[in-house]
Image: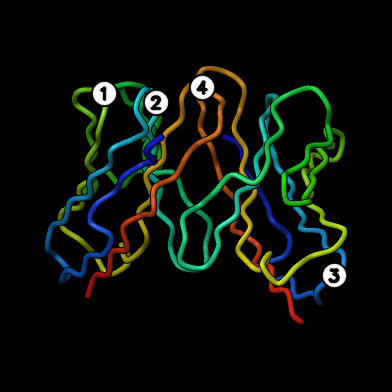
Amino acid sequence: AQSVTQLDSQVPVFEEAPVELRCNYSSSVSVYLFWYVQYPNQGLQLLLKYLSGSTLVKSINGFEAEFNKSQTSFHLRKPSVHISDTAEYFCAVSQWGNNNDMRFGAGTRLTVKP
Amino acid sequence: EAGVAQSPRYKIIEKRQSVAFWCNPISGHATLYWYQQILGQGPKLLIQFQNNGVVDDSQLPKDRFSAERLKGVDSTLKIQPAKLEDSAVYLCASSLAQNTEAFFGQGTRLTVV
């Protein structure tokens, strides 16, 4: 089965600084990749996804992630963070094929400080 | 469009008691998932349904956990008997088709004392 590793459990940054949240996956077949965000006391929401095509995908609130097949990575980046980006971020992977079995990483807590 | 509905939002039970959670997915979504999220960890897939059939339940502790989706719409997850380590948020999610994004409910926070 596929698996996901999020290398950083916590990432503290100052407001307007750039940030990168790292995600690596392992799978024996091709994959779909997702980043979900969980704001305090809220449910999981999809932030962005890679299904096919361009390896660089973007969200509406300034985040982007790049699928790197050779490095089996899908790191999330934002050039300038806001206080409101403080949340838990989860990377997830599902495998091509009949079974859309989505597996999640342990999460990275992003804390943006003023 | 209504989201994924889950109930109850919170539940406190004593160990060895039983508990059931209910999920109503987004209308038309064929795939339904139950995840367990222990505090400080990522969601762990317990079971996945495609319509009313089980696709993957490899991580479901079948000695105490059971789930069903009889008519291919809403679903229930049951724990009997509960253990202290079952304390977690139980998330239900649904997706329209295979390999499309999953939409999550607010979850049920279970505390076993």
Quick one: B15 or A76, which is closer to the camera?
Answer: A76
Question: What's the distance in space between the residues labelled 2 and 1, CA to CA?
Answer: 9 Å
- Give yes or no for contact between labels 1 and 4 (Cβ–Cβ under 8 Å): no
- Give yes or no for contact between labels 4 and 2 (Cβ–Cβ under 8 Å): no
Q: Secondary structure at mark 3?
A: loop
Q: Secondary structure at mark 2?
A: loop
**Figure check: A11 above or below A21:** below
Q: How is the image coloured?
A: rainbow
Q: Nearer the viewer, mark 4 or mark 2?
A: 2
Q: Earlier in the sequence, mark 1 or mark 4?
A: 1
**The label number, if any, that marks residue B98 in the structure image:** 4
Question: What's the distance in space between the residues labelled 3 and 4, CA to CA?
Answer: 38 Å
Q: Residue furthest left?
A: B17
Q: Which residue is mark 3?
A: A16
Horizontal side of residue B35 vs A5, given as left or right? left
Quadrant (top left/top right/bottom left/bottom right) for the C terminus of chain B: bottom left
- Give yes or no for contact between labels 3 and 2 (Cβ–Cβ under 8 Å): no
Q: Which residue is mark 1?
A: B72
Residue at horizontal 13%, vertical 57%? B18
Quadrant (top left/top right/bottom left/bottom right) for the N terminus of chain B: top left
* Same subunit, tags 1 and 4: yes
Residue at horizontal 71%, vertical 72%? A83
Q: Secondary structure at mark 4?
A: loop
Question: What's the distance in space between the residues labelled 1 and 3, CA to CA?
Answer: 47 Å
